[in-house]
Image (cartoon, rainbow, N blue to C red):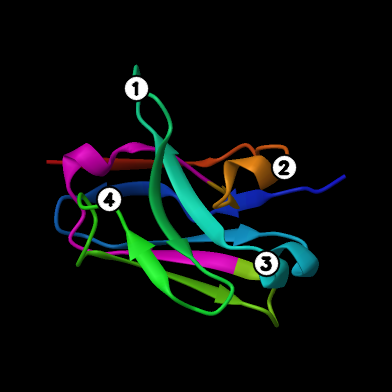
Amino acid sequence: QVRLVESGGGLAQAGGSLTLSCAAPRHMILGNDMAWYRQAPGKERELVAYVRRGGIKHYSDSVKGRFAISKDGVKNTVDLQMNSLKPEDTAVYYCNAADRRLWTNWGQGTQVTVSS
């Protein structure tokens, strides 16, 4: 059973930075487009960023220019560098395949709270 483990969340002030990391099976990281998602209280889960197998990256308009996604086939992680954080970035962050048809079981997520 595939297990995704997110980490790195915490409390940050507006304008600050955090780096999230998702540990996933190597075959999943190398064989799929991988994504970070987030879910704020009372809202649906939304796609934040994804990185294709070939390395092309895509970001939602709300985080473009502030967040950077990367994957590491040696550490078997997908990371999300978050800069210039805003209170509206507050959410639980999750990683999974970018293609919903390939989603595996969701991990516990990692809470990010940004204070103003």
Nearer the N terminus, badge 3 or badge 4? 4
Sequence-wise first label, 2 or 3 = 3
Vertical order, 93 against 58 (above or below): above
Please state if 78 lies on the left or on the right of 58 as rendered: right
Q: Which residue is mark 3?
A: 29
What residue is rendered at 40% in x and 70% in y? 57
Spatial CA distance of label 1 from label 2 is: 21 Å
Q: SS for tag 1? A: loop
Q: Which residue is mark 4?
A: 12
The amino acid type, in three-letter code, at marker 1 is Lys
What residue do we see at 77% from left, 62% from top?
25
C-alpha gap between disc 4 and disc 1:
21 Å
Which numbered marker is on residue 43? 1
What whole-number distance in Å separates the C-alpha atoms at marks 3 and 4? 28 Å
Residue stretch rendered in magenta on the structure: 78-94
Badge 2, how many Cα within 10 Å: few under 14, some, many 20+? some
**Upstream in the sequence, badge 4 or badge 1?**
4
Residue at the image position 43 percent from the left and 32 percent from the top: 45
- Determine the CA span between mark 2 and mark 4: 29 Å
Choose the circle earlier in sequence order: 1 or 2. 1
Q: Which mark is residue 30?
A: none
- Residue 82 drawn at (x, y percent): 31, 62
